[in-house]
Image: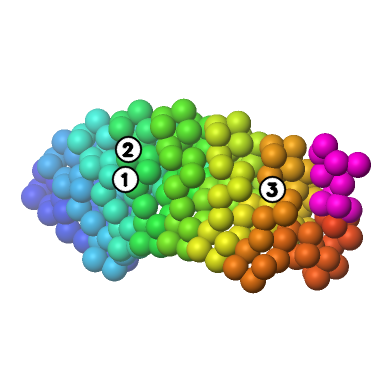
Amino acid sequence: LQAGADVDKAANYDYTALMLASSRGYPATAKVLLQAGADVDKANISEGNTALTLASEEGHPAVTEVLLQAGADVNKVNVYGDTALMLASQKGHTAVAEALIQARADVDKADCDGGTALMVASMKGHTAIAEALLQAGADVDKGDSDGKTALMLASMKGHTASVEVLLLAGADVDKADSNGWTALMIASMNDHSAIVEVLLQAGADVEQTNDHGDTALIIASEEGHTVTEEVLSSPPGRG
């Protein structure tokens, strides 16, 4: 750098030196590069990733703090519409997600498919991150481009703890996606009987139908999910 090296010159994978240091978790190197005038928000051409999105995706909280202190745009997106918070939430990097939230990341910003940080955290079962997002005011009932909410996605993937956290935060248990499917139907389709029980305890409507006229019980029966079928046949308050 003292000899005049171009601090923002891109090399491997169109990454600058700052991007490489950030993705590999070298906070001291990142500081030196920033002090030398590195562009903190420069993005690589192929994917639009910045030093911050790379550090967040790889789970490097110390580098994330350095970049934020240097004024990195916390809501800058890559070509997929992903912010640093979405990437940290998807990968389960709680400390990074918390740092980004504290830096006022937009918790409800959506990617190209309408997905938010809360949705990806819930779908992956990263309950601590989901809790942090909800405490920061994330919209618990926001839907993606298909109308699927965080509760539906957690129910689909079988993450009982995430389902419980979302319900505690006031998630609409009977909200339906663009095809009329509710969390209860989705959990029944995927044979997640424990989640079906949780949803029923939360007051899910066992008689609600999707656009094809199917209830959760019909769906479970057609799929041959006998345990889930039994749970749906004896919901709380009946029997």
The image position of residue 37, as x and y in percent, is 12, 42
Residue 136 seen in the figure: yes
Residue under label 2: 105
Helix, strand or loop at label 2? It is loop
Q: Main secondary structure of the magenta part?
A: loop
Q: Earlier in the sequence, mark 2 or mark 3?
A: 2
Q: Which residues are magenta?
A: 230-239
Helix, strand or loop at label 1? It is helix
Say what amino acid the circle numbered 1 marks.
Leu
For marks 2 and 3, give the one nearer the viewer. 3
Say what amino acid the circle numbered 3 marks.
Asp
Residue under label 1: 52
Q: Is residue 168 left or right of residue 60?
A: right
Residue 32 seen in the figure: no
Say what amino acid the circle numbered 2 marks.
Ala
Helix, strand or loop at label 3? It is loop
Q: Considering depth in this image, is 197 or 40 the residue closer to the camera?
A: 197
